[in-house]
Image: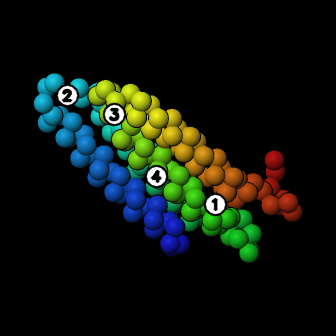
Amino acid sequence: MPTLTRWYIKSSLVWFVAGLTLGIVSYLLPEDVPSSAFRQPFFHMLVVGWLTQLIFGVVYWMFPKASLDQPRGSTALAAITFALLNLGLLARVIGEPAATLGSTAVGGTLMLASAVLQWCAGVGFLVNTWPRVTPAPHSTERR
């Protein structure tokens, strides 16, 4: 298993446990703290942090080889994608409650940064994975 796949999978497990923990903690907060401040980060931690990251890691590991010299595509691009996805998720987890609880300038900036970082991660994943799912030029596969 490639090192980067281990990073993806281990990080996805950390986000999974962190998301479940946030879900529990959000119900234990005082009544004057709106639970809605933590609802979206909770879902993002599970969907982006756990599921999406787990999928990215398994795809990087198990999809067909792109070429003999770079079987998994660009290792650098895959590592950058990993970093962008996690930084974007972290910005969302901090920015959403900040925006909801009153620090709209900080929260809004972090939410924008989160969207851009996660979009860039998605594009990086697409660019690195696309060549691995198209038929080879000499393939006899029907189109």
Residue 53 falls left or right of residue 13: right
Is residue 23 shown to the viewer in this render?
Answer: yes
Kind of residue sitting beneath label 1: Leu
Q: Provide the residue designation for mark 2.
A: 33
Kind of residue sitting beneath label 2: Val
The answer to whether the residues at label 1 and label 3 have Cβ atoms under 8 Å apart is: no
Kind of residue sitting beneath label 4: Asn
Q: Provide the residue designation for mark 3.
A: 98
3D distance between C-alphas at marks 1 and 2: 40 Å
Q: Provide the residue designation for mark 4.
A: 86
Q: Nearer the viewer, mark 4 or mark 3?
A: 3
Q: Provide the residue designation for mark 1.
A: 77
Residue 142, how many percent across, how many down? 81, 51
Bin the neighbour count of mark 4 within 10 Å (Cα to Cα): few under 14, some 14-19, many 20 and up: many
Bin the neighbour count of mark 2 within 10 Å (Cα to Cα): few under 14, some 14-19, many 20 and up: some
Q: Nearer the viewer, mark 1 or mark 2?
A: 2
Is residue 44 shown to the viewer in this render?
Answer: no
Q: Earlier in the sequence, mark 3 or mark 2?
A: 2
Secondary structure beneath dot 3 equals helix
Residue 121, how many percent across, how many down? 57, 49
Bin the neighbour count of mark 1 within 10 Å (Cα to Cα): few under 14, some 14-19, many 20 and up: some
Kind of residue sitting beneath label 3: Ala
Q: Earlier in the sequence, mark 1 or mark 2?
A: 2
Q: Label for residue 26?
A: none
> In the image, what residue occupies the spot 64% across and 47% down?
123
